[in-house]
Image (cartoon, rainbow, N blue to C red):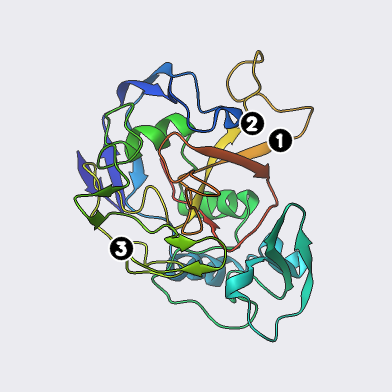
Amino acid sequence: MTAAAGLIALPGGPFAVGTDEPWIPEDGEGPARPVELAPFAISAHAVSVAEFARFVDATGYETDAERLGWSYVFAGEANPGADVLGHAEGTPWWLGVRGADWRRPDGRAEPAAEEPVVHVSWNDAVAYCSWAGARLPSEAEWEYAAAGGIPGRPFPWGTELVLNGEHHCNVWQGFFPLHDTGEDGYRGRAPVDAFEPNAFGLYNAVGNVWEWCADVERVEGAGCCAPADGEERRLRKGGSYLCHASYCARYRIQARTFAPADTTAGNVGFRVAR
């Protein structure tokens, strides 16, 4: 394994994606399915605000959130003076905030340069990859890299979320959605290189921000990665700092969600592969 141009080269080989013991079966976490991965490279961490800014400066690119004029912001993070357009159906802690985008995650304040870029859609992530001479990882590549090549375990470091009293990722502690105790050291997004990397050198493979992957929704009986009813909802992996066992225990390697390609929110970013 070597690192070059910010990417970690991985050998690939046989691997099992998913699990035969799913925590959330309706998400399609199982069954485990064998794959054979060709060698590939993947970035050590999610694309940062500083990295995305260089892309925008070089190309003049305008994100989906900027074009639409709004994005989803977690209620506990919305600026007090935010122009709230409404709530997400079924999840009232997500507010549609006018002016929220990658430059202003809460609608007003600028993010730290070392934070993962958020409020980026799958479309935006693909545009960045094209500029960077890269691509989004597949789900199989993402799981293999996140797991350090060891299939089955839910976390990059083993089977327990908190190991020997030590936190290894940025997720929600306390009572969701009202109070995050920040026991892991962070309330909100952590720097892209927070915590110790996994065995392959990846940072924050679970927690912190969801990461877009290349796959479209997998439908039972239709084979891996087939679109659902003509809608190409795109895959996200890894969970985020808003995941909590009482609501969203998707801070695991096998966890997965899907969303339309133009969806943006304050807890979704991406990393690149080649």
| Location of residue 106 in the rendering, given as x and y in whole percent from the top left corner | 60, 75
Badge 1 is on which residue?
A: 232
Q: Mark 1 or mark 2: which comes first in sequence?
A: 2
Badge 3 is on which residue?
A: 194
Three-letter code, disc 3: Ala
Left or right position of 177 against 5: right
Three-letter code, disc 2: Glu
What residue is rendered at 28% in x and 45% in y?
8
Looking at the rendered image, the quarter that the C terminus falls into is: top left
Q: Quadrant of residue 219?
A: top right
Looking at the rendered image, the quarter that the N terminus falls into is: top left
Q: Mark 1 or mark 3: which comes first in sequence?
A: 3
Label 2 secondary element: loop
Q: Residue furthest top?
A: 221
- Circles 1 and 2, Cβ within 8 Å, touching? The answer is yes
10 Å neighbourhood of mark 1: few (<14), some, or many (≥20)? Answer: some
Q: Please say if 135 is above or below 48.
A: above
Q: CA distance from mark 1 to mark 2?
A: 7 Å
Left or right position of 86 against 111: right
- Circles 2 and 3, Cβ within 8 Å, touching? The answer is no
| Location of residue 127 in the rendering, given as x and y in whole percent from the top left corner | 59, 53
**Which numbered disc covers residue 217?**
2
What residue is rendered at 58% in x and 64% in y?
266
10 Å neighbourhood of mark 3: few (<14), some, or many (≥20)? Answer: some
Label 1 secondary element: loop
| Location of residue 178 in the rendering, given as x and y in whole percent from the top left corner | 56, 68
Residue 105 can be seen, yes or no: no
Q: CA distance from mark 1 to mark 3?
A: 32 Å
Three-letter code, disc 1: Glu
Q: Please say if 34 is above or below 197.
A: above
